[in-house]
Amino acid sequence: MCLPSRPVSKTHSFSSSSSTIATRMINCILLFAFIFLVYLLISASRLQSKNSIHAYFSSSDQDQSKSLTKINHIVFGLGSSTNSWPARREYVKLWWDAQKMRGCVFVDHPLSSSENHTDSDLLPPICISQDTSRFRYTWRGGDRNAIRIARCVLETVRLFNASSEEVRWYVFGDDDTIFIPENLARTLSKYDHTSWYYIGSNSETYQQNSIFGHDMAFGGGGFALSSSLANVLARNFDSCIERYPHLYGGDSRVHVCVLELGVQLSREPGFHQFDVRGNALGILTSHSTRPMVSLHHMAHIDPIFPNSTTFSAVSHLFSAVELDPLRIFQLSVCYDRWYSWTISVSWGYTVQIDSRHLLLPVVLRTQETFRPWGQSGYTFNTREIHSDPCQRPVTFYMQHVSSSRHNGTIESVYTQAYENCTYDPITSPRKIQEIRVYSKRLDLDIRQLKAPRRQCCDILPTSSTGGKVMEIGLRECKENELIYMHP
Ligand SMILES: *[C@@H]1O[C@H](CO)[C@@H](O)[C@H](O)[C@H]1NC(C)=O
Ligand SMILES: *[C@@H]1O[C@H](CO)[C@@H](O)[C@H](O)[C@H]1NC(C)=O
Ligand SMILES: *[C@@H]1O[C@H](CO)[C@@H](O)[C@H](O)[C@H]1NC(C)=O
Ligand SMILES: *[C@@H]1O[C@H](CO)[C@@H](O)[C@H](O)[C@H]1NC(C)=O
Ligand SMILES: *[C@@H]1O[C@H](CO)[C@@H](O)[C@H](O)[C@H]1NC(C)=O
């Protein structure tokens, strides 16, 4: 130690060389100054090399987590037509937030003035597509509108790339694509928009993928282009689509033009093309642990809630989406040991009780409640449903969702769908009329988004309801917790 052990009470001049204490002090100060200088130099050089290595690998995970992608970082381009827009805009109204979102709906001809102004404060602005008649289109029996729809990419980028507000992502979809905007933004937060990304998902049916490409983002499910990629793509777009007149759709054209830049699809299972018909329950309840980003083709499937029209069903779903978007359709599985029931909660949508003990991998297989669009064959594992509805799991549909202002607990209530079945009032899950599920709003950070984990559920002790109500709590699973029926 070179510092005097006790404070120097007298004032010493630095020039006084007679005082040994003063000399030692000066030496100390000089030494410290020198060490500090060396430290500064070393740390500065280390900082610099770290920066250049960082830039070299262009991975900025940490920077990204500091600034999650917000809805207002995204610009939307929706492919529509003068004919389809009046019916489709009701769906867009459900998810569009004119205060926060930017974008355009592309139609082929000007709308009448009254059509143009209907709810224009609740909807994206209408843009008229440019003339594409000079491009060749040679898919026999196809629809050359595909070129116009593909060109939404170029026209959207041109409209917004000079905007003063930052654009991180361009997202494209059809006018019947239903986005869950919070989940879209959160999903894109995982990616660095300054690198080139083409993000979306393919079709659920094997045949569609075989024809159009297993590695193509299907347009109906929507897809995202990082702004850095979109700007480069836009520059080469017209010359590119001229090279591929033989392709069918707009999405195929975007796909090949991205491929020409050497970029491949980053698959995100939250984007849903929905190439199925009938009852989509099986697909919805077996949705990935990643957030649900989009739904499509709602008018081609049965309404997703009983006793509803297609529109009122989607609107009903959004009453749950509004309270906890990231949790929508997330599946938790728990077991009732006493009755040997298997209970699966698809949050905001259904609770299903199977009166048997099903192993988790069986529960997670998609129940084949639907028919394919075209030929049979899916890109995921399915399980058959029983031909007799009374032998199928008892299904409860979301009735309403509410949030407690005091403690943030979200209660979702599910009621049993009626089936004309006889049952044992003691042991059958049909005796239950209502299921109440309690949870907290999900708020996933980048780490959890990249490595999602299914949540666990507990059957809560319920008294004084005569077995007609079941209560379930959802929570994060414990460190080593396993999902199986405990003996
Ligand atoms: C709709 O109205 C706006 C302004 O009211 C106008 O700028 C736009 O060109 C119109 N669009 C169509 C498709 O008629
Ligand atoms: C916007 O896109 C156009 C068309 O590709 C391009 O010419 C222009 O340089 C872009 N501007 C910016 C700011 O990226
Ligand atoms: C949260 O508040 C509601 C009433 O608003 C109450 O019923 C519920 O028991 C509370 N939950 C917890 C966990 O405190
Ligand atoms: C559907 O409507 C019928 C008749 O109005 C009613 O009895 C039934 O409970 C409803 N089902 C659901 C799931 O709301
Ligand atoms: C319910 O099913 C029984 C036979 O299982 C049948 O006799 C009865 O008519 C059915 N009721 C309705 C409302 O369909």
Image (cartoon, rainbow, N blue to C red):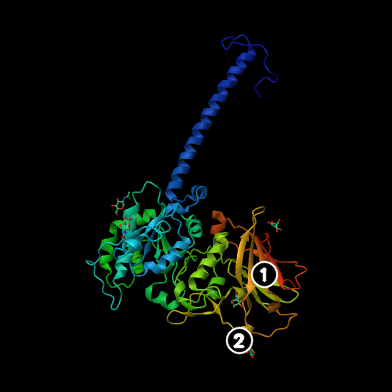
Task: Identify the residue at horizontal 70%, vertical 70% (top origin).
Answer: 470
Q: Amino acid at mark 2?
A: Asp
Task: Identify the residue at horizontal 63%, vertical 84% (top origin).
Answer: 420
Q: Nearer the viewer, mark 2 or mark 1?
A: 1
Task: Check disc 1 and report the residue beneath it.
Answer: 435
Task: Check disc 2 and report the residue beneath it.
Answer: 388
Q: Nearer the viewer, residue 251 or 232?
A: 251
Q: Relative to residue 29, is residue 134 drawn left or right?
A: left
| Element at label 1 | strand
**Pointer 2 local density, CA inside 10 Å: few below 14, some 14–19, many at least 20:** few
For residue 13, say whether it is visible.
yes
> In terms of image quadrants, where is residue 364?
bottom right
| Element at label 2 | loop
> Residue 298 — which label?
none
Q: Nearer the viewer, residue 222 or 428?
A: 428
Q: Position of residue 447 (x, y in %)?
A: 56, 55
The image quadrant where one finds the N terminus is top right
Q: Amino acid at mark 1?
A: Ile
Label tally: 2
Q: Relative to residue 88, is residue 368 drawn left or right?
A: right
Q: Nearer the viewer, residue 27 or 487?
A: 487
**Pointer 1 local density, CA inside 10 Å: few below 14, some 14–19, many at least 20:** many
